[in-house]
Amino acid sequence: MSLSQQTFIAGKWQGLSMFLRGTIHYISVIIMARYVTPDEYGVAALSFVILEFSNLFVNAGFGPAFAH
């Protein structure tokens, strides 16, 4: 299998992974909004924002920089 084919397959898997992650997150937010109070939902939403912001730094390669 050539390098371009491997790259294409890896890209498809990455795209599928991102799509599934977003779909699961969306469904979990809908379920959570149904079962918690507005105050609890606000706290959870704020924590999601903080977690996603920290993931942004980790995925950007700042993980090793934070360790130093």
Image (spheres, helix red, strand yellow):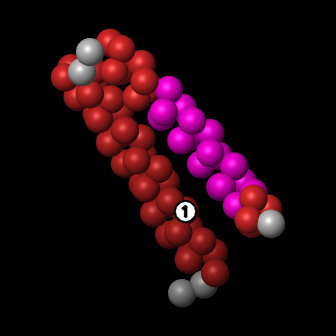
Residue sitting nearer the eye, 8 or 63? 63
In the image, residue 49 lies in the stretch drawn in magenta = yes
Q: Position of residue 64 (x, y in %)?
A: 74, 66
Above or below, 51 relative to 68: above
* Relative to 18, residue 46 above or below: above
Picture coordinates of residue 37 (x, y %)? 26, 15
On screen, residue 7 versus residue 38, left or right, reads: right
Task: Identify the image quadrant of residue 3.
Answer: bottom right
Which quadrant of the structure image shows residue 7?
Answer: bottom right
- Residue 23 counted in the magenta span: no
Query: Which one is nearer the viewer's eye here, 38 or 1?
Result: 38
Q: Quadrant for the N terminus, please.
A: bottom right
| Residue at x 65%, y 55% (from the top left corner) | 59
Identified by mark 1, the residue type is Gly
Q: Position of residue 46 (x, y in %)?
A: 50, 26
Which residue is denoted by mark 1 in the rendering?
Answer: 11
Q: Position of residue 60 (x, y in %)?
A: 72, 54
Q: Can you tell which quarter of the image residue 35 is in?
A: top left
What residue range appears in magenta? 46-63
Residue nearest the observer in this picture, 7 or 25: 25
Residue lying farthest to the top in this orientation: 38
Residue drawn 37% across the image and 38% down it: 25
Dot 1 falls on a residue whose secondary structure is helix
- Specify few, some or many for label 1: CA neighbours under 10 Å numbering under 14, 14-19, or 20 or more: few
